Amino acid sequence: MASKEGIPSLRQCLRPGWWIYWQKQIYCIKSLDSTNLVLHVEDHLSEETKTLQVKHLLRADGKDQAIPLYAPTLEQLLRDIKDPQPEPEGAPENGLPHELIERADKMIDLVHFVEEKARELQCRERNEQGKCSSACEVEECKCRESDALRTACALLHEPVGLTTFYDYRGRCRKNQWDRIQLAASYRRSTYSKTRLTKAQLHFLDTVITDYYRADRPSSPMTVLKIARSALEKHLQNRWVDPEKCEKGVPQDLLAELRLVLDERLPMQAIRENTNKEKLLREITMPSRGFFYQYLRWFESQPDQGKKVLNDRYGKGTWERIYMVFDSFAHRATFPLQYVFADHYLLDVFIVDEATCSKISRLWLTVLIDAYSRCIVGIALLEEDPCIESIQNALLHAIWPKSSHTAMGIEGEWACYGIPQQLFLDNAWAHHSHSLENLARLIGQNGKFDTIDLVFRPPYKARYGGLIETYFEWLSDRIKQFLPGAIQSSDPKHIRDAAKKACLLYEDINRFLQESIVEYNHTPHRTLGMTPHQKWVEGMKTGIPMVPRLTEETKRQFLHLIPEKRQITEKGICVFGMQYTSPVVASAERIGMDKKPIQYSLRYDPADISKIALFREDHWIDDIGAKELLLPDGCYKPTSLWEIQTAKALAKDVNGDTRDWLAYVNKAEELKKRRMSEKRRRQRELQKGADDHTQPTSAEVNITKTRSSQHNDPTELLARFLS
């Protein structure tokens, strides 16, 4: 288990020779039965040998000295016992806006100036008019304190009234002239405060610290279900109210409430005690959204969350309980509980299939299971990481895999299923309405699990440690076995890799799938077995339940357009084109409420000639673009990038985008011509012409062609495609 700074890990604390102080007794650890989680200890005073359950040590039930103290020596343990933990205080103040700080400084300076000026006026002699100063407006100036203060207020660069001054001085004195407290006093009383009562917050804190811990098999959804069920069925919707407890929440009452949570004590037994009944308050369970937000606030802000929890519940609470990201591998108790996703730019060049001369690199998206360390899904794309990368990887991960067997790769790739929690980094592309919609739809209205999306904190590389470790392993294999591999960032190595590049996309895809199958069946040092064996062990309770992979389900993994569309007489307008089909022509346009029906659309950016039409999350039909319809009834495959490029060229040449389709056709023709010329030139070069100083016929033809098309507005696109 990962250890925090200054806090020893649990494994270290339970080593033989360490000392424990628990329930007012001091023990010396003799041995640990790791199988049954039983600790054999010796009582320091009686020297008797006893056994302690590790799970009892890990649970904090709130009793006096219930949280055990650990130390490597008896002397250090005695010092820790003499240094009790402080009573928890409220959460620390967040940073104040700079404007409020400036306002507080200005107020303090103003009060000091007025008071000093007033004292000076009271000691000053009268002028010819019998006034203390020329600014004095008092008819009979007797230099009373109020008269002097009023005059001093009038001498300010921005004069204030005496009543305002009294208000300023009262605020300063109330906050003991502390600029931070004074600035904070200008915030509304409800600022940054939840509408929940203290009883509700105390209930949430108790449930979270008891059930959502590093040593327990739990997830946010599980803890939420436990809390709801316990509150309604066992606690009778009541919990202790800290506001009714004059000397703090009674620990005996809290211990009894915990027994009710564990179904070991009926709630009625507590309520029959009138003194304890008075301290209870009827509460309701907060919404699921608030509960998840409240829980993840600590997870996503480790530094601030650590301080808050340690201040509330005592030193070491964060390290003992909230080791969520650093120990998720240890907390995972079954497959698909935590699945991590990340992207990796492969350290190898590939060549295009048509000419075998154009080099590029591929992006690999990987989904890895924290429990078994198995690779559950991948996506290999030429595009930079995007929402399609994650959705394609999920499509590969959720259903049983046949991609490796189709290539003739031997070995079982058994892992599949719907991830309960999918951890993503905070990349902008991951915050997508399309992915959120897919995570909800995959559950099919409660028939199957939905995917809970969790975004890892930014700038916290260690939170993706498992998947980063796999990428390092894969990078070493690529550099060892593949031609065209980039050995380092040295420009010389990059040039050498480009010269040796000869592999196609299919070669890299096969190599990756072979490597993943080998990785899944290679013993893992931490697991003590192979990831495949760990997966099979976790599947003894039952195989994953997944929906049927129908045509509708496949289309749910396409990119969702956030805005819905209405069907018009011409069809549906998207990407500047009109999409239609026989189904669209006869589809309903007005609903029962006399309002236009809204339809959702999903598309593949690599080919937008046809898109999928949905109504209320149900697939209706695939509709095609009229502009891309060919004479034979098929549709011209066209990517979104090609459409955007053609429109940009049309606008540059003609000033508008109406003729963009002509540029798409010209670009296709030029692409075919350039590819033909390139292949012809390669054939001639392979023959080895005797006179290398003279241009070949292919080069002459290419030069003539380019000269004749020098003014062609599609030349830019043609050069790029060639």
Image (cartoon, grey):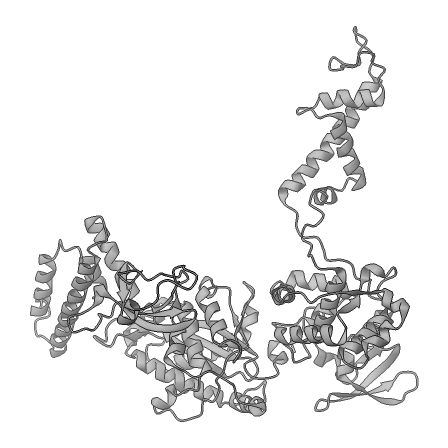
Q: Position of residue 419 (x, y in %)?
A: 52, 78
Q: How many labels sit on residues? A: 0
* Screen quadrant of the C terminus: bottom left
In the image, is residue 96 above or below residue 288?
above
* Screen quadrant of the N terminus: bottom right
In this orientation, which residue lies closer to the viewer: 616 or 698? Answer: 616
Left or right of 101: which side holds 503? Answer: left
Left or right of 346: which side holds 42? Answer: right
Instruction: Examine the rendering and report whether any part of residue 362 can be seen.
Output: no
Q: Which residue lies at the image location 76% right of the left edge and 26% below the top edge?
A: 162
Q: Which of the 4 quarters of the picture holds residue 618? A: bottom left
In this orientation, which residue lies closer to the viewer: 626 or 422? Answer: 626
Q: Position of residue 700 (x, y in %)?
A: 8, 65
Q: Residue furthest right?
A: 46
In this orientation, which residue lies closer to the viewer: 252 or 72? Answer: 252
Left or right of 434: which side holds 316? Answer: right
In the image, is residue 494 above or below residue 659?
below
Instruction: Examine the rendering and report whether any part of residue 642 can be seen.
Output: yes
Q: Position of residue 388 (x, y in %)?
A: 40, 70
Q: Position of residue 180 (x, y in %)?
A: 72, 44
Q: Residue furthest top?
A: 128
Q: Which residue lies at the image location 67% right of the left edge and 65% below the top edge?
A: 286
In the image, is residue 360 above or below residue 140?
below
Q: Which of the 4 quarters of the picture holds residue 102? A: top right
